[in-house]
Amino acid sequence: MSHPIVRAIGLVIVLASLVGCGAEDPADESGGSLGQPITCNGAGARFATGTIAHSFGPGQSVGQNLFPKPILGPPKGAGCCEGSLDVVSLGNGGSVTVEFAHNAIVDGPGPDFIVFENAFYVNGDESVVFAELATVAVSEDGSSWTEFPCTATEAPYGSCAGQAPVYAGPDAPEIDPLDPTAAGGDAFDLADVGVERARYVRITDREDQVGQNGVFDLDAVGIVNPLCP
């Protein structure tokens, strides 16, 4: 039988170890935890690992039966002239909020993150884009949000997601999916809305868009400038 003092010391050690573990950002089944602090112990996720909220609207429902799998990880673009089918349609007015395990977006040089949809050039004509638009918002705590301005009535559409083809994908391994000059998709700079850091990205379909083709189909979200590289 161990001495009472020895048992007490052992209990203190166990409790101390549990407190130390609590300093990290604990992962749940969706890849992260709302409101928990981040410690950069190695590389954090550069693509969405889970969702903290979603609300699908009526209309198109492609990929919703597989949600959230199609929107996690890197994009699977189909190039300039064809839309990828590895997406989740948000439905009219629908939205989804993604997170990144053990990571956050920070304001750095140039664009800070990319939202990938499945827009494409109709018949290869770059002046005719099959665009399905969404408003993008960012948050540090998951409750206070800052939106990028999206004017969805006519091109150019302002800071909207869903208007640029996606070139990065399994069929183009030479393209870095986190290079905003080559990957395609719609790149966003936190400086444009006066935000220094964001842990969550919310994408909301523009059901009020005029002259467009349908609902936003989310492929992926990637961090260009990460807190934990």
Image (spheres, helix red, strand yellow):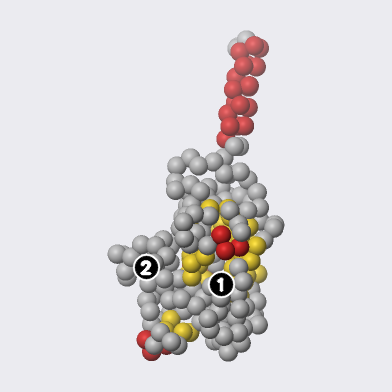
Residue that carries the numbered disc 2 in the rendered image: 182
Q: Residues under labels 2 and 1: Cα distance?
A: 18 Å
Which numbered dot is residue 159?
1
Q: Would residue 42 be visible to someone looking at this image?
A: yes
Q: Foreground residue, 90 or 202?
A: 202
Please rate how many residues cluster around mark 1, counting C-alpha atoms within 10 Å: few if below 14, some from 14 to 19, many from 20. many
Above or below: residue 56 compared with residue 156: above
Q: Quadrant of the N terminus?
A: top right
Q: Residue at x 61, y 26 (%)?
A: 16
Q: Foreground residue, 185 or 194?
A: 194
x and y percentages locating residue 96 in the rendered image: 60, 66
Q: Foreground residue, 227 or 64?
A: 227
For badge 1, the amino acid type reads Ser
Q: Residue furthest right?
A: 143
Q: Residue at x 57, y 35 (%)?
A: 21
Quick one: label 2 or label 1, which is nearer the N terminus?
Answer: 1
Res 22 quadrant in image: top right
Q: Would residue 168 be visible to someone looking at this image?
A: no
Above or below: residue 202 compared with residue 23: below
For badge 2, the amino acid type reads Ala
